[in-house]
Image: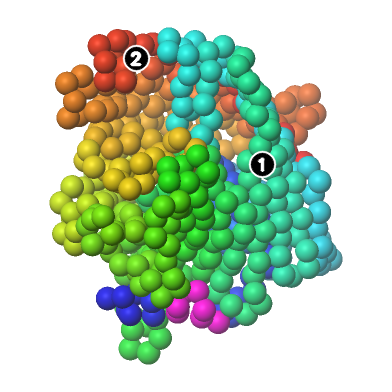
Amino acid sequence: MRLILILILSFIFLAPCILEASPSVDVPLRHWSYDAIEKLAIIGLCDIADIGIRPVSRIKMAYIVKTAIDKARDYDKEFNWNEQDYLEHLLNKLIGEFRVELVAIGVEVASTFDQPLPKNTLKILNDVKIEKVYAKLDKGRLLFENKDGWVLKDGFNARIKATAWAKLSELCAFSVTPGIRYSSEDTDVNIEDAHLRINPAGWNTEYAIGRSSMWWGPGFHGSVLMTDNAFPMDTLRINNIWPFRLPWIFKNMGRWSGTWFISRLEKKFNPFHPIFTGWKLDYIPAEFLKFGVGHILMFGGKGVNMYGIHDFIGNSSLFFSSGGGENDPENHIMSWDAQLFLRRIDRFLPIATGAKLYTEWGAEDESKSIPVDLASITGAYFTDVFKIPGFDLKAEIARFHKVFYTHFKYISGYTHKGNFIGHHAGGDSEDISLSGIFNFPDEYKFSATFSHMRRGLTKAFIETTNQIRLEFSLTNALNMYNIKDVEVTLFYELDDITNFENTGSTANNHIIGAEVTRKW
């Protein structure tokens, strides 16, 4: 098994590439384009191979959009007038966002001039995002889940981020996002994101060095292994640019896609500075079906035996360690996921145009080689519900055994800077989420999300949180004042908590805020 895995990953990362892959920076993890291509994939206009591993580079996103443009011409007759109008707006928005990259790969519809683009590009200020939040918190502080480890304090909070990037010839691209986090108690200045991307000419490989968040898996409210719930980590990442077929007699088995990274956790982790590394491998046997497997390995740190290179290569490919004895120097977590894409289900079930059904399962290594105490995420995503273009519904349920995200030697557990790297609910928990979205590109977006989360399921007092979040966004909100490329988002969140921190107390949190993004 170990040899087969190493061979597959070698083909994915080292295979020659026949397509042009100009270097470009990452698309931010919460960028609207990820939701757009996922919706297009569900209705059959995008390749499903690129759904589930984030971030991707802008040039890779451009190729995904190119596929959607090409398929839209073939599937034009399958959509009614309202659907065609909606898809045209969505594709035009994607073309506008990635126009530079689309022109670079020869997409004529994105080009308005005949001159080639310059090889060296510099944007001193690409965008600025200002978030202002007022939080009325009964208990003084609250983690803003899936927000890069942003902890809200009672009273006014703010976060300001500005992004600059540069492309240097055909070898590399660089991006940096400094940020300020303000509350009534303190002010922090951070580098929220900074990475250098390198694309070796002629190879199906991208390298990224720097600080960024990652998301692995099909879920929308959380994932087993990697999410943006914690502060971004400093990593070395490798991923393939395009899905790859194995050679020889295996070429008709389907396509493969993967990523690998290595990092080091912070000094305050107990024991401090352990090595944190992992890989994710996706297999696409058909255009409507996708399987994935992921593995995280934590080893080293003060007082823990370090690996040599031979031990590292071997244990990085193992599914489980020896089961957690005194001499066990590592912590393993695995996940498996499956996604089924159902296109044009309205032909036999008039509830939606398309659907994605998915599940993800995780296991800790405390059970030796046999996974017993599992985590699971199961969900569904319906597009254009009741044939209303832009109206989507999502539902998801997650369950985690009490041993999940814990380890006898790594006392801090599966955390970075105090917050869970995986699902925000943590171990010994259950989380149910329902979300309704109405989105019309270039105009507005409204979403309503309800979640019911229970923590400490094996304790006498189970903490229960009922959360409602409402969000309204206006795209190009200031066009009437001749100010373009400004997006304004207003949101409100209510948290009703009983048995707070597994005690008999209660808490109610009210969060209201605004987010303004200006692009240049």
Q: Please state the horizontal and vertical placement of residue 195, each as a whole percent of the image.
A: 65, 54
Q: Secondary structure at mark 2?
A: strand
Residue 214 in view, yes or no: no
Q: Nearer the viewer, residue 66 or 380?
A: 380
Left/right of residue 420 with respect to residue 88 in the rendered view:
left
Q: Please state the horizontal and vertical placement of residue 13, each as a whole percent of the image.
A: 50, 74
- Indicate which disc residue 191 carries: 1
Going 39% across and 80% down the picture, which residue do you hit? 7
Left/right of residue 333 with respect to residue 26 in the rendered view:
left
Q: Secondary structure at mark 1?
A: strand
Q: Quadrant of residue 206?
A: bottom right
- What type is the residue that disc 1 sits on? Ile
Classified by dominant secondary structure, the portion drawn in magenta counts as helix
Magenta span contains residue 324: no
Q: Nearer the viewer, residue 103 or 254?
A: 254
Going 53% across and 44% down the picture, which residue do you hit? 267
Going 45% across and 31% down the picture, which residue do you hit? 145
Image quarter hosting the N terminus: bottom left
Left/right of residue 430 with respect to residue 420 in the rendered view:
left
Residue range (magenta): 8-16
Residue at the disc numbered 2: 496
Seen in the picture, residue 85 relative to 337 is either above or below; the reply is above
Image quarter hosting the C terminus: top right
Q: Please state the horizontal and vertical placement of residue 119, each as a whole percent of the image.
A: 80, 66
Going 48% across and 27% down the picture, which residue do you hit? 144
